[in-house]
């Protein structure tokens, strides 16, 4: 009969590809459930509501949308804010929604294809194949059962990991934006799949008729389901009797199909409800002593809970599962575990387990492995029992967690050694067989020649019968074949030859010859070695793989993480034993990859990578306790050396030597250093290991663990310390000093890593600080971006070394931070910027350009280069760059808001502003109406002046802070990296020279290639070295705004009279304390604003101001007041500051304001 899985068998290949696709869908489903965006989780299911979750609630709909789509869309279209929010949501999450919807479609397509396959089989499309004879074939029976089982697992995992309310939101969101491209028929089936069933995975609350009603949404022919269940009920579909031949291991042998049977029964719920005899037979055969089973790779279900609502199933299970039986099973499991541990200690005794012992005691070793794995399986699974009374009986009688882990480690070690040894025997089987056979045949030929009587130094009478007999045996040995298909016959022949050699040794001719007897003994030994070699077959290795399967522990071992870590902490050398456990756990890849590999599916790589990466993550979580302890010990060492250890002076008197000896401290130092060496030796003793398709390097794991601990400690310290509830300069300075001391401790610890562990500690420090700062900066700037960078998609985020994302609404934040700040700042980067802006608030401080600092009302410096230096020592140069960039984002936001104000003003008062400009034309003349033209227009536009003031003030403060940071970074780069500073400066000069050459001669000098990273990278280096000037930057590509200079003139006329010249600070200060204005920040803000437009805007504003000064002086002269009115002085000082920030030359300034005016005011 044709093999069902052969390439020529269309029926078998179709079913194999279908099952392979099901395994791929399950892998993708599990991959996505680990990355669910919190914004999609409904508030009813989310315990801690995040800001984004509430933010998008208005644009997320469940299936009620499908009944009232027009009303919902009308609500969205009526609000510009909701439309922008909807577009923002789609831009940020469209990729995830698309992947999730494709998974839903794949599940629907899978069951449709399965039903189509069954229909084709029944219709005779596959000649000579029916459902009945497919179930008679070994491979066909397995595939058909797996096909139905995988669909059931998809439904269960979908309900467990992706609740119905979330599924509805995903489908509706995708349909609203991509509905035109979707198939209506397929969409209807997807909606049927994703409609909420009422099941709540967090609480376990199950609606009536669940999950059979959920399974019934997609119909599968009941007669086929009945036949599949019948086969699993009565047959051993995976034929594992040879792996578990003992009757006490029956439930272990049938465990895989027992899990499949549990899932498939939901497709035929009447069996669970009313077929008492059938359920009794199923329970007695598959669940007679285990009621906690793995439905799929770590998804553990308790049958006593799951079958509670099914009368027949509950009655059948109650006959075997009771409190008394649970206690008996737990006690029996404990007894078996103790016996197994005794056997393991004997086998793992050093020097006992070798190849000869393995071949001689193979059956005993296999029996030990069976018992150990059966005990572990029952113990691990039933620790998850949900019934309180069963759980109590289990705890009182079962093996402790520590002993269970010991059994697991020892079992894994035995299995690893046996597999490695047996694999070597398999690889060397041919060579060993040939060696033994040739030696055996040679000895038999020598014996044959011995009895010819012609061999020298022998006085044996010629015996023809002996000569012929030994020669014949030698020929028989030469013809022996070791191949597996002839193994049984070969073994029988070898035993016959051994028996014959034993019998012939009793002959009189041989009994008296010690030499011949010795030859016969050696020959029999070689034959026995050949017999053992024949038994080395791939079947034994296959049985080992089946027996040692640990796929059921995919999630279970997480329950024992603390036990594993505690054991490593107590004895770091345990990591060597853990290597075998990790290899044992790698058997999880066999379940999903078996069918995928059989049909050469392209999904094999992605599925293998997913499960391998999950396995490696588990390994990292287990051994990260080493990194935590090493990091803590290094901190203790650094703290001891920096605070308690006294340095030796150059000269020391003998009587004072005892004082400097510090024996106690040096003993602690030696003890901690020794402890560090033990931990590092422990993990480095674990050799490189291939887990799935990923090779695990213990040295890399140690480095990643140290990186992870460093990131966690530094990020936590920054998050906890960088809070400024009072918002004062002293508080800011105190926080910066405390954080700086902690950061110095962390940095010194990483320096010591270079000495103790031979890792690049400072390189790790720089890289991780860069990631922490930039990740938090990226998340902080999301509030200014339409297309947000999700935390999981950030290039600064890593799965291996994750940067923690703390919420500003945590309890610590609530206790330490004001509510207003929490709504603005999303991370410590935002809080630092907010604190700096609060310290430099124009209502309480005044900026002095000559000192580059803000001063308070009492004349004390509030924020200057000294404070920035302290901040730099706490968050580093990278942190300063991050704060600088965040200020840049705030400037962009403020400028956009400012432009919106200007456009709103132009739209409402466009005619007024045009009339105002006409009244001022030409600028070199005094207006006909004099100063009244300013007053009249200002009255009508007064309501817009305060928002403009707020924006200009914020932009100016941010620019002045950026200027301080640039000067500080420039000083640091000159002092700490002079060569880099000079090189970057030379590079910048060269790039600018090339650009100017192109501008002057575009024909002969090539234009810079678009997308060339040279200019971008040069800019980044300039910013890092503080060589950039924030007043040179173009923040917004703004369209021309009509009447902008005239509007700015009105703004200045409104607020300049409220300021006075402060001779001590050399700048404009507020005239009264109640005025929230500061001259220099306003000048800096307007200079930045004008920089975004053509230089003619600046010249126009200077011309208007010049005209205003002349008009004010002219009006003063006509009214017999002082020649220079009071409002002129602030205007001229403002002009001087504006020209300084805008880098307008004196010549250009004097073109509008004659030099003698400044001379008269003694401002030169």
Image (tube, grey):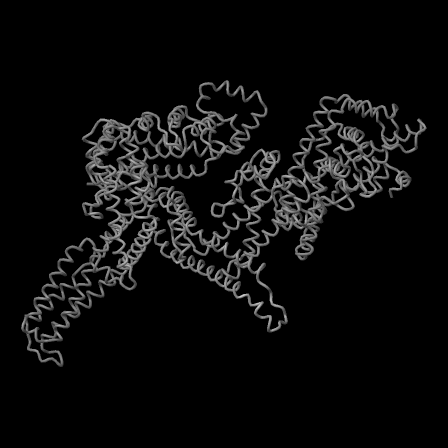
Above-or-below relation of 541 to 1066? below
Q: Do we see residue 1100 in this rendering? A: no
Q: Residue at x 26, y 50 (%)?
A: 337
Q: Nearer the viewer, residue 848 or 130?
A: 848
Q: Quadrant of the C terminus?
A: top right
Q: Quadrant of the N terminus?
A: top left
On the image, the x and y values in percent for residue 383 come to: 32, 42
Q: How many marks?
A: 0
The single residue placed furthest to the front in the displayed view is: 655
Above-or-below relation of 178 to 302? above
Q: Nearer the viewer, residue 937 or 528?
A: 937
The single residue placed furthest to the bottom in the displayed view is: 457
On the image, the x and y values in percent for residue 912 come to: 78, 21
On the image, the x and y values in percent for residue 1010 come to: 62, 42
Side of 244 where 1094 appears, left or right: right
Side of 1151 where 567 appears, left or right: left
Side of 441 where 836 appears, left or right: right
On the image, the x and y values in percent for residue 229 come to: 23, 33
The quarter holding residue 579 reads bottom left
Q: Nearer the viewer, residue 59 or 572?
A: 572
Q: Do we see residue 601 in this rendering? A: yes
Side of 932 where 110 appears, left or right: left
């Amino acid at each position: 009969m044709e093999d069902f899985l052969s390439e020529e068998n269309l029926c078998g290949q179709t079913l194999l590809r279908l099952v392979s696709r099901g395994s791929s869908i399950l892998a993708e489903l599990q991959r996505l459930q680990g990355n669910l965006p919190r914004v999609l989780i409904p508030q009813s299911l989310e315990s801690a509501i995040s800001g984004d979750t509430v933010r998008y609630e208005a644009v997320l709909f469940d299936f009620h949308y499908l009944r009232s789509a027009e009303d919902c869309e009308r609500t969205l279209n009526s609000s510009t804010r909701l439309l922008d929010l909807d577009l923002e949501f789609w831009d940020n999450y469209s990729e995830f929604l698309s992947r999730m919807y494709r998974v839903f479609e794949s599940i629907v397509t899978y069951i449709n294809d399965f039903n189509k396959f069954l229909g084709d089989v029944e219709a005779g499309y596959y000649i000579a194949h029916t459902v009945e004879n497919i179930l008679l074939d070994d491979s066909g029976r397995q595939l058909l059962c797996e096909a139905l089982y995988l669909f059931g697992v998809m439904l269960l995992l979908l309900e467990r990991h992706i609740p119905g309310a979330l599924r509805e939101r995903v489908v509706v969101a995708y349909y609203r934006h991509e509905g035109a491209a979707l198939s209506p028929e397929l969409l209807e089936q997807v909606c049927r799949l994703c409609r909420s069933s009422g099941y709540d995975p967090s609480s376990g609350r199950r609606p009536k008729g669940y999950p059979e009603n959920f399974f019934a949404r997609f119909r599968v022919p009941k007669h086929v389901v009945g036949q599949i269940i019948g086969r699993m009920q009565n047959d051993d579909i995976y034929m594992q009797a040879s792996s578990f031949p003992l009757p006490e291991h029956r439930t272990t042998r049938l465990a895989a199909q027992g899990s499949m049977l549990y899932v498939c029964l939901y497709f035929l719920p009447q069996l669970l409800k009313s077929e008492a005899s059938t359920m009794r037979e199923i329970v007695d055969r598959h669940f007679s002593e285990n009621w906690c089973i793995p439905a799929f790779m770590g998804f553990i279900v308790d049958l006593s809970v799951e079958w509670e609502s099914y009368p027949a199933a509950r009655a059948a299970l109650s006959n075997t599962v009771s409190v008394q039986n649970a206690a008996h099973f737990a006690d029996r499991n404990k007894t078996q575990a103790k016996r197994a541990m005794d056997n393991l200690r004997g086998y793992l005794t050093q020097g006992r387990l070798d190849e000869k012992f393995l071949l001689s005691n193979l059956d005993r070793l296999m029996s030990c492995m069976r018992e150990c794995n059966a005990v572990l399986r029952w113990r691990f699974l039933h620790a998850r029992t949900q019934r309180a009374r069963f759980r109590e009986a289990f705890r009182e009688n079962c093996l402790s967690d520590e002993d269970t882990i010991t059994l697991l480690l020892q079992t894994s070690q035995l299995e690893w050694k046996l597999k490695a040894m047996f694999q070597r025997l398999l690889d060397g089987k041919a060579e060993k067989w040939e060696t033994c056979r040739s030696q055996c045949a040679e000895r038999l030929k020598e014996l044959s020649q011995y009895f010819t009587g012609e061999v020298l130094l022998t006085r044996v009478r010629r015996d023809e019968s002996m000569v012929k007999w030994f020669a014949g045996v030698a020929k028989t040995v030469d013809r022996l074949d070791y191949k597996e298909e002839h193994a049984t016959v070969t073994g029988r022949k070898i035993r016959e030859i051994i028996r014959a050699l034993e019998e012939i040794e009793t002959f009189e001719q041989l009994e008296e010859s010690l030499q011949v007897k010795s030859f016969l003994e050696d020959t029999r030994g070689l034959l026995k070695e050949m017999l053992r070699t024949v038994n080395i077959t791939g079947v034994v290795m296959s049985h080992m793989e089946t027996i040692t399967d640990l796929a059921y522990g995919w999630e279970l071992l997480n329950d024992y993480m603390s036990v594993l870590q505690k054991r490593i902490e107590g004895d770091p050398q345990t990591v060597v034993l853990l290597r075998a456990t990790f290899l044992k756990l790698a058997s999880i890849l066999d379940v999903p990859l078996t069918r995928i590999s059989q049909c050469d599916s392209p999904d094999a790589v992605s599925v293998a990578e997913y499960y391998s990466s999950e396995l490696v993550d588990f390994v990292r979580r287990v051994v990260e306790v080493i990194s935590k302890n090493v990091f803590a010990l290094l901190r203790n060492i650094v703290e001891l050396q920096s605070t308690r250890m006294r340095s030796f002076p150059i000269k020391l008197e003998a009587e004072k030597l005892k004082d400097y000896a510090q024996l106690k401290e040096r003993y602690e130092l030696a003890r901690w250093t020794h402890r560090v060496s033990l931990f590092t030796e422990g993990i480095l003793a674990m050799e490189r290991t291939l887990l799935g398709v990923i090779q695990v390097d213990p040295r890399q794991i140690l480095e990643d663990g140290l990186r992870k601990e460093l990131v966690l400690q530094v990020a936590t310290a920054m998050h906890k310390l960088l809070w400024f509830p009072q918002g004062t300069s002293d508080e800011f300075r105190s926080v910066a000093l405390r954080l700086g001391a902690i950061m110095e401790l962390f940095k010194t610890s990483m320096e010591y890593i270079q000495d103790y562990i031979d890792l690049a500690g400072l390189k790790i420090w720089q890289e991780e600080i860069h990631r922490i700062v930039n990740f938090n900066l990226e998340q902080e700037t999301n509030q200014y971006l339409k297309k947000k960078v999700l935390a999981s998609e950030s290039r600064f985020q890593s799965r291996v070394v994750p940067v923690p994302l703390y919420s500003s609404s945590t309890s610590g934040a609530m206790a330490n931070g004001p509510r207003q700040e929490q709504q603005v700042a999303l991370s410590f980067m935002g809080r630092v910027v907010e604190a700096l802006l609060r310290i430099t608030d124009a209502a309480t401080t005044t900026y002095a350009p000559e000192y580059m600092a803000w001063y308070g009302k009492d004349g004390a410096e509030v924020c200057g280069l000294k404070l920035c230096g302290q901040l730099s020592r706490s968050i580093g140069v990278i942190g300063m760059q991050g704060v600088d960039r965040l200020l840049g984002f705030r400037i962009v936001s403020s400028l956009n808001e400012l432009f919106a104000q200007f456009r709103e003003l132009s739209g409402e008062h466009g005619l007024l502003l045009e009339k105002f400009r006409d009244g001022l034309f030409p600028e070199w003349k005094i207006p006909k109406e004099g100063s009244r033209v300013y007053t009249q227009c200002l009255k009508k536009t007064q309501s817009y002046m305060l928002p403009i003031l707020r924006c200009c003030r914020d932009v100016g403060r941010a620019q002045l802070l950026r200027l301080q940071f640039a000067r500080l970074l420039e000083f640091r780069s000159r002092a700490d990296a002079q060569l880099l500073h000079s090189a970057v400066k030379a590079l910048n000069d060269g790039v600018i020279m090339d650009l100017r050459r192109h501008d002057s001669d575009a024909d002969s000098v090539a234009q810079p290639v678009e997308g060339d990273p040279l200019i971008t990278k040069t800019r980044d280096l300039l910013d890092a070295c503080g060589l950039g000037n924030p007043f040179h930057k173009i923040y917004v590509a703004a369209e021309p705004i009509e009447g902008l200079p005239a509007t700015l003139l009105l703004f200045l006329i409104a607020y300049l009279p409220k300021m006075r010249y402060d001779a001590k600070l050399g700048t404009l200060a507020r005239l009264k304390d109640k005025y929230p204005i500061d001259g220099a920040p306003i000048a800096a803000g307007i200079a930045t604003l004008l920089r975004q437009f053509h230089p003619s805007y600046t010249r126009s504003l200077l011309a208007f101001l010049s005209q205003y000064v002349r008009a004010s002086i002219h009006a003063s002269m006509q009214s017999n007041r002082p020649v220079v009115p009071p409002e002129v002085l602030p205007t001229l000082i403002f002009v001087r500051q504006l020209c300084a920030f805008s880098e307008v030359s004196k010549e250009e300034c004097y073109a509008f304001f004659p030099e003698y005016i400044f001379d008269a005011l003694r401002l030169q």
